Amino acid sequence: MVMTSRILGATVRRTRLVLLHPRLVSGNGHASCPRRMHSSATEIHSAPIEAKDFLDFVNQAQSPFHATEQAVLRLRKAGFQEIKEKDNWNNTLKRNGKYYFTRNRSAVIAFAVGGKYKPGNGFSAIGAHTDSPCLKIKPVSKKEKLGYLQVGVQLYGGGLWHTWFDRDLSVAGRVVVETADGKLENRLARIDRPILRIPTLAIHLDRSTSADGFKFNNETHLTPMISTVTKSLTGAPPTPLKPDTEINGDIPLSEKHHPVLLHLLSKASHKLEKILDFELCLYDTQPSAIGGAYNEFIFSGRLDNLMMSYCSIEALIRSLKDTNSLANDPNIRLVSLFDNEEVGSNTAHGADSNLLPSTFERLSLANYDCEVAASHQTAYLEALPKSYLISADMAHAVHPNYSEKHDDGHRPHMHKGVVVKVNANQRYATTAPTTVVLREAAKKYGVPLQEFVVRNDSPCGSTIGPMLSAKLGLRTVDVGNAQLSMHSVREVCGTEDVALAIKLFEGFFEEFPSIDARLTVD
């Protein structure tokens, strides 16, 4: 039996699975119906459409460049206009307009200008990030050992690297190519089949694994193999690289990387001789999937933090479907997806750069609807205390096998709401007033909230929230959906939480100006 209903804006299909006790099955295999016997049934719900849509997003977002591209595709479909950071925005921006731009093609900012916006008014902003811990191919990756062709990799971020062993891996990222007319262009590249593998050592050859656990060296043992010498593309052993001391100046790309890797990459992007350089991430080729007996889990890589990136973009788009909502908004609604959060954000396209401050300043001082001198000198400085930022990054769900790692009163669960993260030492930027603002929006839109505080005997991670809050003097709250296995090659979160986060963020965009008008904190 199939039923359809609407829950918190999410379309849910229900499949009724009837579990029969053996005594209710007759000898011929048919179910019997004894008088006065109550039937027992368990409903298996199909995953919400938001969870399935997220799978479409994350399964095409194997690198920050691909994640940015997926966000851009959704923004374009929703009618957002691309602008360039290097251009003059005066005489381009209009009230009720929707715009986006990218930096490095790995970070993107999208915004919609309220119909009642005036220079000096605030920003209703959400920040997330496009990067996740992964292995990245080294500038000189060509390795050969005992008849195997191997690819040298670097560690990016703080991954659970043991989870990358025995996975079917491939590469995705960007290549820089020279076109036929001599232009240098940035292009996406992805090999859509498993080509790499990091094999573990058989337990028969290392019995200490049973007693001491799995131990490995990040440099020597975490090197994937791509082929055997006898099956390499040329049919002959590759020419070994000269020692670094013998290399004078740059060396050809074909000598830095195995020909078979370049061949596969050229088929996935452009002709071999056109590729000048590349940045490639390794990724697990197993697609993200819905799992659990009741379709309650998402099994996927890169949940941290593509889940929050997806929810932020979707919420911005959905908040604009009612044209009256934006037309009556005195603020600018904005989403910023940064790169390099996993390595400290201190890059030109990270949250610790000038990306968000310069955007706020330009929007505060810009002319809208071709007005002349509508802005004023202090508009940017006036806008900051009127603004509010949701720092959206995934949170730690309580683990059934390691429950002692959570504080007793702060154990977030999947399916029980968005998590508000608090830390007395300001590893999160949440304060009492910023929590109240979020709670008011959550209450109006029926979204439950949870709270997380790290144990006093445990270190606390951080997010982009504190650095942006300090850099801009910006009121900020840190939130995220609960998940398990954070920084594993394969993570877990709840399917129902996707719609909850979207609904919360959508409500924030629509309600923040009115909520803020009721709040006084000087």
Image: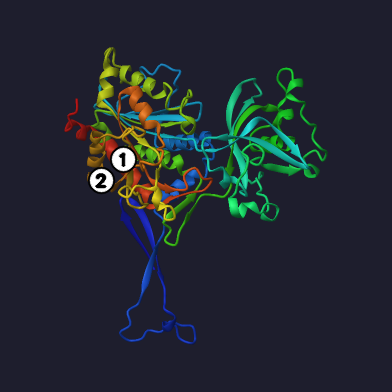
Q: Which disc, if any, is residue 445? A: 2
Residue 453 figure quarter? top left
Vertical placement of residue 49 versus 440, above or below = below
The Cα atoms of the two marked residues, 1 and 2, are separated by 9 Å
Whole-percent x, y for residue 347 in the image: 48, 24
Residue 211 figure quarter? bottom right
Residue under circle 1? 506
Residue at disc 2, secondary structure = helix
Whole-percent x, y for residue 148 in the image: 75, 42
Give the mark, 1 or 2, whose residue is nearer the N terminus. Answer: 2
Question: In the visual, does 137 lie left or right of 304?
Answer: right
The residue shown at (45%, 86%) is 26
Work out whether residue 192 can be spotted: no
Looking at the picture, the colour scheme in use is rainbow
* Residue sitting nearer the eye, 126 or 57: 126
Which residue in the rendered view is the most extreme toward the right?
236
* Residue sitting nearer the eye, 454 or 482: 454
Disc 2 marks which amino acid? Tyr
Residue at disc 1, secondary structure = helix
The image quadrant where one finds the N terminus is bottom left
Dots 1 and 2: beta carbons under 8 Å? yes
Question: In the visual, does 426 lie left or right of 349?
Answer: left
